[in-house]
Image (cartoon, rainbow, N blue to C red):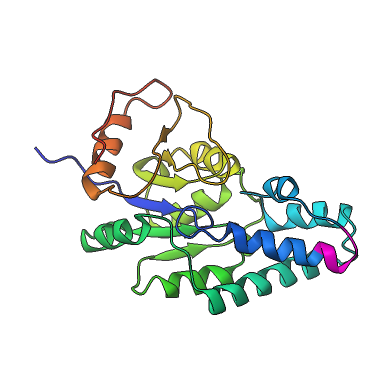
Amino acid sequence: MNSPLPAAVLWDMDGTIVDSEPYWMQAETELVESFGGVWSHSDAMLLVGSGLEGSAVILQDRGVDLAGDAIVHRLTSRVQELLRTCGAPWRPGALELLAELKTAGVPMALVTMSQQRMARQIAELVGFTAFDTIIAGDMVTHSKPHPEAYLTAAGLLGVDPEHCIAVEDSVPGIAAAVASGAVVVGIPHMVPLPESAHYDLWPTLAGRTLHGFTSLYTARRGSLGRRPAPTDPH
């Protein structure tokens, strides 16, 4: 008997599908230095997975003398420029898994705290219409770790979030996805992710397939909040 498909897969973007974090770090460093400040790697790590508005406050504290919305605009524009000139550094296995899920007819959403204009740029760079809807940071009231973005995405797809799989790489993102009720898989990237009974950890998406997602979904349904049985790695 075949395992049931999830109603949808909800994808984080930065660090999960595309390795854009180095672009963000470059944009942050350039901005802080333009105001005479210093921005270290450890400073940049504080912003991984956070909403842009909260990041803007931290940058203001480090001497960036701009309004929050101006900081968000400057950072986003610079990262978009880097994507255009340097290309999208895809995370291993992400495009292949997107293509397989698309072929299988699984609805998908992009759920990111980046701005909508950048999310649409990334979606176009995928090369095929992978996402049925996009929820971006400038489309919601509350940033991750609040579950609003995931709940909104599931609502637009017309599915129960508890019947979805969410894929994330950051602690705030995982917290948001877990709070939405989705089955959650974490793919550690820039920051380590703690083990938890509330989500699964995969070291990479490379080699992962639709079967791996359906096995995870089947194992997790009815076992949320308890340590699940091992799932098929592929």
- Exactly how many numbered labels are in the figure? 0
Residue farthest toward the left in the current orientation of the protein: 1
Image vertical order of residue 154 relative to residue 122, above or below: above
Q: Position of residue 14 (x, y in %)?
A: 54, 57
- What stretch of residues is rendered in magenta? 32-37
Residue farthest toward the top in the current orientation of the protein: 226
Q: Position of residue 177 (x, y in %)?
A: 50, 42
The quarter in which the C terminus is drawn is top left
Q: Is residue 223 magenta?
A: no
Image vertical order of residue 162 relative to residue 107, above or below: above
Taking the spot 29% from the left edge, 23% from the top edge, the residue there is: 229
The quarter in which the N terminus is drawn is top left
Image vertical order of residue 200 relative to residue 20, above or below: above
Q: Position of residue 99 (x, y in %)?
A: 28, 63
- Give the side of residue 22 with respect to residue 189, left or right: right
Q: Position of residue 221 (x, y in %)?
A: 31, 32
Between 75 and 36, the one nearer to me in the picture: 36
Taking the spot 28% from the left edge, 44% from the top edge, the residue there is: 213
Between 17 and 2, the one nearer to me in the picture: 17
Taking the spot 43% from the left edge, 32% from the top edge, the residue there is: 199
- Location of residue 222 by image quarter: top left
Q: Is residue 35 magenta?
A: yes
- Location of residue 79 by image quarter: bottom right
- Give the side of residue 1 with respect to residue 21, left or right: left
Taking the spot 38% from the left edge, 65% from the top edge, the residue there is: 132
- Give the side of residue 161 with respect to residue 138, left or right: left
Between 101 and 208, the one nearer to me in the picture: 208
